[in-house]
Image (cartoon, coloured by chain):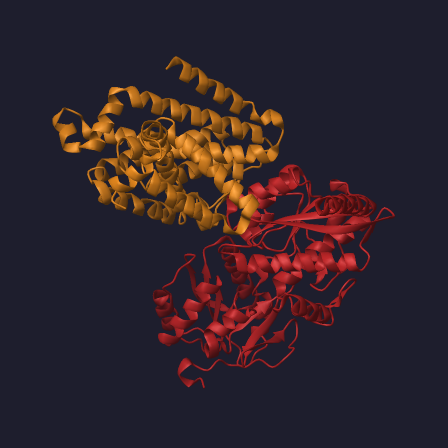
């Protein structure tokens, strides 16, 4: 008897929920992310960023497409940091789960593979996980990127260097040989030439390198005023530790592309992270206005409360990916893939991340904010003018407190 | 015997008709499964028949991948020319490295081949024509059915070759080498020629699979092309199915690919862990593969498992 009642209730519940579903129309965004495996740490940033944006837009009443209100839904699959599985899951999202639009995975390599699925099926994909120039060199029409191009990562840093006292003259440029860092080095060479710096040593090292002693010996012999370094976090940790133990110093400053914005990184290095310059395209600022979150600072608080960790630029760019679709769908007034794609091309809005506009190739262009580690915290230093006083010049290892 | 061939032919025809379902996800899984089966089958020639555990097959795969990619992305040649170039590079490499290192036996051979893919990967990462460490981008094609059918044809060809080997004088020679190389030599088997030929055949099919995969996935870099875990998977799949048999590696790789996909899509997070457990259990209870299990169960029933444990002193 009890069972029968339960069964009846279950059926009633299913019917009601179906009716309820039929009444609200839904746009589904799909992504295959690294929720487990090597890249799980950063995959999580994107999942949480997408989720917080989708939920917030729904709380605020969803979006109006051609006069009808739609809610957003998110479908995330775990590709376990397996490239092949990622590609298959995107095909699954498109053909079997019938998601309407695609959000990207983390990392340039994953994006290179997965975006081909979007292009194959002519479904727009907006992603903030891949910044390498190679991704946007293929003439794809359905792919958009909210991570700024690698070439210009040191743009604001080099500009700042012209205004420092004493002004550095010589640069040691060290970068890895992966797609991102090759673009970075190329862009930095042009920047140095433009601002009249002399690159005294220009070294490429192989990705996943752990021993920097030869490179460091070379740097020491050239005694540069500034070291500009590009690579991944693990390599950065090794480089800095070995620089300390071999007592290799730049006369004035040291800047790296990764690590500084990450709390884990600063914790791992402790005092040795002090004085390091870095960059971020994003800092939680009340000046970043947003239709759904109010502003950047409010967003950061909301995010910290809900997920228990600090949002960084990956999270913010993930939010802007979802908002790109929200704006484009409202502008297009239809779910038609090509109409939405054309609306994304014309994107022009402000959000918690930045002012979103896509260039010719489908990639955003953002200035990087120069930041520095001071007493274990990130301090924004320079955009196109000084925001705070940098700790400068860099004391040699032996004279640090 | 004829019945069995007809049955296999029917299976191949049924597989060839799979794209008619129009289920793109199924086709994706299909391409993956067929390519893996080809890789396992190719490894079977050198590892299963000749008994030389090769960890160099991922290098042949990488050469096939890069041959195709360089031809298409850098020289703007058609796909089939790329496939030929990739296969050619792999065959040349197999001959060049086969002659010196096939003199090594057992563990020494395995270790010598282990270094190969790291070396090639480093060379490729420093050549301009191969796009250095950044990788190469191939043109995008919206035709997964073609890739599926190509992969199927390749698997049929590889399996046909292995079927021929299994019943030829050449195959007997390889088995003799596996069981006792000195005795084989005394009996008049030209061991050097046989071993190099086996490695070349293995390299040939592996490279073709790499070429098809490159064009299908459209982006390659040294890390993905010379991935040693791929070689480990070939070995596991061939061992799981039954090394030195004709159909064992194919069935083994189909089953393992299916199990992996099932775990990845339904249980997700613990997939890799469970996949490992499946392999450990398989090695303990059926160290000679599924093929042996089928015969053993009929003969001994459940005692087959006990006997395996006892025979291998676990």
- Would you say B132 lies left or right of B186 here? right
Q: Nearer the viewer, residue A275 or A47?
A: A47
Q: Which chain is orange?
A: B
Whether residue A31 can be seen here: yes
Q: Is residue A149 above or below residue A282?
A: above
Q: Which chain is red?
A: A
Q: Nearer the viewer, residue A154 or A239?
A: A239
Tell how many labels.
0
Q: Is residue A340 above or below residue A195?
A: above
* Displayed quadrant of residue A289: bottom right
- The residue lying at 67 percent from left, 39 percent from top is A122
As drawn, the residue found furthest toward the right would be: A67
Whether residue A148 can be seen here: no
Location of residue A140 in the rendering, given as x and y in whole percent from the top left corner: 63, 43
- Would you say B198 lies left or right of B29 here? left
- Would you say A285 lies left or right of B53 here? right
């Amino acid at each position: 008897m009890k069972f029968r009642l339960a069964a009846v209730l279950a059926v009633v519940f299913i019917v009601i929920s179906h009716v309820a579903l039929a009444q609200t129309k839904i746009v589904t965004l799909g992504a295959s992310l690294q929720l487990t495996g090597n890249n799980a740490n950063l995959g999580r940033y994107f999942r949480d960023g997408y989720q917080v944006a989708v939920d917030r837009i729904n709380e605020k009443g969803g979006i109006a497409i051609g006069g009808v209100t739609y809610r957003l839904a998110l479908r995330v699959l775990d590709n376990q940091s397996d490239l092949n599985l990622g590609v298959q899951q995107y095909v699954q999202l498109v053909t079997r789960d019938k998601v309407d639009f695609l959000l990207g995975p983390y990392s340039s390599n994953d994006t290179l593979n997965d975006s081909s699925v979007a292009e194959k099926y002519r479904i727009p994909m907006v992603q903030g996980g891949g910044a390498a120039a190679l991704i946007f060199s293929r003439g794809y029409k359905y792919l958009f990127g909210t991570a700024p191009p690698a070439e210009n990562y040191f743009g604001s840093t080099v500009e700042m260097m012209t205004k420092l006292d004493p002004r550095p003259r010589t640069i040691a440029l060290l970068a890895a040989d992966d797609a991102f860092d090759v673009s970075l080095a190329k862009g930095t060479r042009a920047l140095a030439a433009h601002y009249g710096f002399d690159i005294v040593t220009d070294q490429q090292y192989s990705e996943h390198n752990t021993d920097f002693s030869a490179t460091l010996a070379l740097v020491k012999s050239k005694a540069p005023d500034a070291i500009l370094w590009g690579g991944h976090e693990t390599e950065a940790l090794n480089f800095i530790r070995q620089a300390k133990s071999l007592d290799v110093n730049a006369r004035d400053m040291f800047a790296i592309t990764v690590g500084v914005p990450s709390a884990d990184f600063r914790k791992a290095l402790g005092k040795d992270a002090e004085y390091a310059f870095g960059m971020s395209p994003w800092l939680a600022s009340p000046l970043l206005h947003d239709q759904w979150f109010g502003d950047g600072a409010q967003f950061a608080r909301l995010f910290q409360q809900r997920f228990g960790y600090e949002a960084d630029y990956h999270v913010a760019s993930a939010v802007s990916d979802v908002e790109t679709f929200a704006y484009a769908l409202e502008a297009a007034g239809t779910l038609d893939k090509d109409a939405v794609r054309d609306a994304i091309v014309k994107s022009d809005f402000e959000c918690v991340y930045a002012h979103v506009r896509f260039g010719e190739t489908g990639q955003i262009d953002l200035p990087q904010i120069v930041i520095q580690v001071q007493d274990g915290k990130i301090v924004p230093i320079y955009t196109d003018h000084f925001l705070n006083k940098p700790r400068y010049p860099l004391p040699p290892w032996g004279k640090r407190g | 015997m004829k019945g069995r061939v007809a049955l296999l032919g029917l299976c191949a025809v049924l597989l060839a008709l799979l794209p008619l379902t129009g289920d793109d996800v199924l086709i994706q899984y299909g391409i993956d499964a067929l390519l893996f089966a080809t890789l396992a089958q190719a490894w079977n020639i050198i590892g299963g028949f000749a008994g030389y555990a090769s960890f160099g097959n991922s290098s042949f795969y990488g050469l096939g991948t890069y041959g195709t990619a360089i031809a298409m992305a850098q020289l703007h040649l058609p796909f089939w020319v790329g496939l030929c170039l990739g296969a050619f590079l792999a065959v040349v490499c197999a001959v060049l490295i086969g002659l010196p290192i096939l003199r090594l036996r057992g563990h020494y051979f395995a270790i010598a081949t282990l270094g190969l893919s790291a070396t090639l990967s480093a060379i490729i990462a420093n050549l301009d024509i191969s796009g250095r460490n950044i990788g190469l981008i191939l043109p995008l094609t919206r035709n997964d059915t073609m890739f599926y059918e190509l992969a199927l044809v390749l698997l049929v060809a590889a399996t046909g070759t292995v079927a021929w080997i299994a019943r030829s004088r050449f195959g007997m020679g390889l088995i003799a080498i596996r069981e006792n190389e000195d005795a084989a030599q005394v009996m008049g088997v030209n061991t050097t020629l046989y071993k190099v030929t086996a490695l070349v055949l293995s390299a040939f099919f592996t490279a073709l699979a790499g070429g098809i995969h490159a064009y299908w996935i459209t982006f390659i870099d040294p890390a993905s092309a010379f991935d040693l875990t791929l070689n480990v998977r070939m070995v596991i799949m061939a061992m799981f199915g039954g090394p030195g048999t004709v159909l064992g590696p194919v069935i083994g790789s189909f089953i393992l690919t299916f199990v992996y996909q099932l775990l990845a899509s339904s249980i997700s997070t613990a997939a890799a862990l469970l996949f490992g457990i499946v392999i450990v259990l398989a090695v303990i209870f059926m160290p000679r593969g599924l093929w042996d299990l089928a015969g053993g169960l009929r003969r001994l029933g459940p005692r087959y498992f006990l006997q395996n444990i006892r025979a291998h002193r676990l």
